[in-house]
Image (tube, coloured by chain):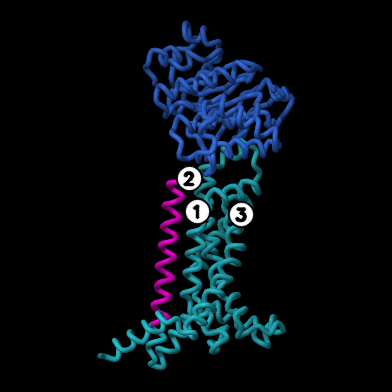
Amino acid sequence: MSPFSDSLALAAGLVTHLDPKLVAIVELSLRVSLTATILAAAIGLPLGAAIAVGRFGGRHFLTIVLNSLMGLPPVVVGLVVYLLLSRAGPLGALGILFTPTAMVIAQTILIVPIVAALSRQVVADAWSEYREQLTSLGAGTFRAALTLLWDTRFSLATVVLAGFGRAVAEVGAVMIVGGNIDGVTRVMTTTIALETSKGDLPLALALGVVLIAIVVLLNAAAQYIREWARVRYG
Amino acid sequence: MDERPHSGLPIVCRDAEVERDGVRLLTGVELAIPQGTFTTVLGPNGAGKSTLLRLLHGLVAPTRGSIRWGEYDARPRSQAMVFQRAVLLRRSAAANVRYALELAGVRGAEAEVRIVEVLADVGLADLANRSARVLSGGEQQRLALARAWALRPEVLFLDEPTASLDPKATRAVEDIVRSIHGRGTTIVMSTHNLAQAKRLAGHVVFLQEGRQIEQSPAREFFIAPRSSEAAAFLEGERL
């Protein structure tokens, strides 16, 4: 057998036997990315709805900024969060650099623009359809935004899943602010990068398989939600 | 049952004009909508019918002239509007009515009674828990009417409510509208369907190219229109 097929066989063994080290890394990855996604949804969804429905100065500028930030390079986010949380930084006293909390912060910053910009688009499209009817019924701006968030919930679920996909597959930011410490801040992507550079492929491959499986599952979930909602709610 | 505040009538427009992005959509609107009337806004496509309804409902403000609702300068809440294409929320038929009632401050047992009542009125009692957006076009428009009627409006605006419906669904909507009018609600409805206007209207406002050409009792309008434009429209030259 070739070294590559050996590695593949070893990787398959790690996955099928639920290797404790592999499971711990996957668990931490999911915990960090899920927490970041929940925080990003809590910030991004209302922000997107407010920009879509609200009438205030700088709204168009804010939309451009959010759209631009969707392509924010993870390493830049990592660097900024590192500078903020490092001992000499303004938030250094918190002492959370190289912890999962720092990774959550970095990922949240990374995906808030994605969730906010995409939800703004979803809500704005709905608003152009509902505006007159909601105004006619007497809904104020706040109530209209809440109504639209609820009415577009299935599209927004896809948006949140996209945010989670971005977070869980990201490597640069968590590498910088987490430090890739074994057993503490080592997640799937940073482990893959490290193990590949060491030439130790089985764990990297096994994690790669898990990561791809997660991405496929996310897409399947998004597709299922869209279809189910279309049939159930029109 | 009839607890409507009667304060937003008559609706009076004085030389009202509506302009958007430099385009004049309506000009010289001079009319009054008295209580209890059934007014049909007639005119060919692009005449400004929908804009006039939005002006009367307070969804657009006049760029010149004035509009008053009884003693008010701002639109009172005792109005409702049904649009050409029913805009329904992604929730059940009953929840759509409940939402409108909540916004009007009607909640709890009173709201539930009214929901059952209005859905029965429009023949949707059996579909109360069905998602609104999966209903047929005719059912959606009846639900939109039920939602509007649940608010017990003093004035109900209908913007070509049967434009995309088949004859059977059109008749059903017309019957409901007639019934709502029969219970004392003032109706203002736009249409380009002459037969429908003849069936329903008490008064006609005729528009063409954004201008109000005439306002007259329906019988008079259909037998002897005052303007050459209306005469041409009635002869089918400007449909």
Residue A6, quarter of the rendered image: bottom left
Residue B11, quarter of the rendered image: top right
Residue at far bottom of view = A198
Task: Check disc 2: other Cα within 10 Å, few if <14, some if 14-19, many if 20+.
Answer: some
Q: Amino acid at mark 1?
A: Phe
Q: Which residues are magenta?
A: A206-234
x and y percentages locating residue A103 in the rendered image: 58, 78
Do the dots labelled 2 and 3 sit on one chain?
yes
Task: Check disc 3: other Cα within 10 Å, few if <14, some if 14-19, many if 20+.
Answer: many
Badge 1 is on which residue?
A154
- The cyan-tinted chain is A
Mark 3 to mark 1: distance in Å? 18 Å
Q: Amino acid at mark 3?
A: Ala
Residue A50's disc number: 3
Residue A59 inside the magenta-drawn segment: no
Q: Nearer the viewer, mark 3 or mark 1?
A: 1
Residue at far front of view = A17
The numbered mark, 3 or 1, whose residue comes first in the sequence reads 3
Screen quadrant of the N terminus of chain B: top right
Residue A216 inside the magenta-drawn segment: yes
Task: Check disc 1: other Cα within 10 Å, few if <14, some if 14-19, many if 20+.
Answer: some
x and y percentages locating residue A197 in the rendered image: 41, 91
Host chain of mark 3: A
- The blue-tinted chain is B
